[in-house]
Image (spheres, grey):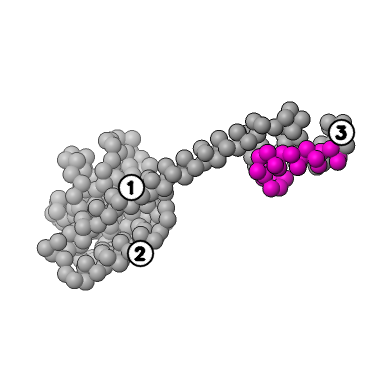
Amino acid sequence: MTYLARSDLESLLDFVGDVGELDFDEPYPLELVRRLMDVVPCDAITYQELDPRAQIFTVEIGFGADEDDDPDGYWRHGPCPTLAYRERTGDLEAVRTSDLIGRRSFVELPVFRDYFKPAGLEHVLDLGLPSARPQLRSFVLFRRLGARDFSERDRVVLEALRPHLYRLEAHAALRRRLAEALQELDNEASLDAYSVLTPRESQIAELLAEGKTNAQIAAVLWIAPSTVKKHLEHIYAKTGAVSRAAVVGRSRHS
């Protein structure tokens, strides 16, 4: 925190407060990615998950980047110095391209000349995130050609967010697990409810799920429409359904 001024700390607190109000179960929603641009000013930003060996981006959420960006073009001309550094060292610390290679050498690389430069981008600040090898994950911030490079302040501010980003990932994972558990309980409850139906009630529930009316069900089963109605009342009572639509939904789950 040595390099952080009061305004930096206030910006970090605002970010933590704002994204804490977002509900999401996958890292990271577009709004959170965009909000990082207010903490560390940049012209484009991307959250990415990639497999360098397979040369694919498995997840890429960006804001401010060229809509016509060609991911395959990156692999034709790359990797960039930052990605090569991550692969070689496994270091996740926030790093600027200028920390790894001089500008004169960087602008001569194919990845700059044929990929970054046509996109109007020059400066890169990358925050690595934990992942199972060979996968790599990171937030990548860009500044345009001719702009000022990212400063040490920018690097330290981004790095200061790391613990909070980890908490957000844990929170999202917990929401996802709870949602899956609730879905399993709902499915089990649906199966349990329909297991108490009589064979005739089960037939009616299945025909109802096919979209048949009471009259059509009565015709198929050779019973009176009033009998179908009475069976439906029993089905509602046993399963807790309150409408035909609810019976159809639960029948499909079962």
Q: Is residue 62 left or right of residue 6?
A: right
Image location of residue 130, percent across then percent down: 26, 43
Q: In this view, does 66 lie above or below 86?
A: below
Cα distance in 3D space between marks 2 and 3: 61 Å
Report the residue at 28% width, 58% height from top: 142
Q: Give the range drawn in magenta.
A: 225-248
What is the CA distance from the residue labelled 2 to the residue labelled 1? 17 Å
- Percent x, y of residue 21: 39, 61
- In the image shown, does 204 or 197 lie closer to the viewer? 197
Q: In this view, does 42 lie to the left or right of 88?
A: right
Residue type of the residue flagged with mark 3: Ile
**Disc nearest the viewer among 2 and 3:** 3
Q: Earlier in the sequence, mark 2 or mark 3?
A: 2
Task: Check disc 2 and report the residue beneath it.
Answer: 18
Which amino acid type corresponds to the residue marked 1 in the rendered image? Ala
Instruction: Decide: few, some or many residues near mark 3? Use Cα within 10 Å; few <14, some 14-19, many ≥20.
Output: few
> Residue beneath label 1, please?
170
Crowding near pointer 1: few (<14 within 10 Å), some, many (20+)?
A: some
- Of residues 76 and 21, the one drawn nearer to the viewer in this rendering: 21
Residue 223's label in the rendered image is 3
Q: Residue at x 38, y 49 (%)?
A: 172
Magenta-colored segment: predominant secondary structure: helix
Labels 2 and 1 touching (C-beta < 8 A):
no
Q: Is mark 2 on a helix, strand or loop?
A: helix
The answer to whether one can see residue 252 in this image is no
The answer to which image quadrant residue 211 occupies is top right
Task: Give the vertical position of 17 relative to 247 (above or below).
Answer: below
Location of residue 135 by image quarter: top left
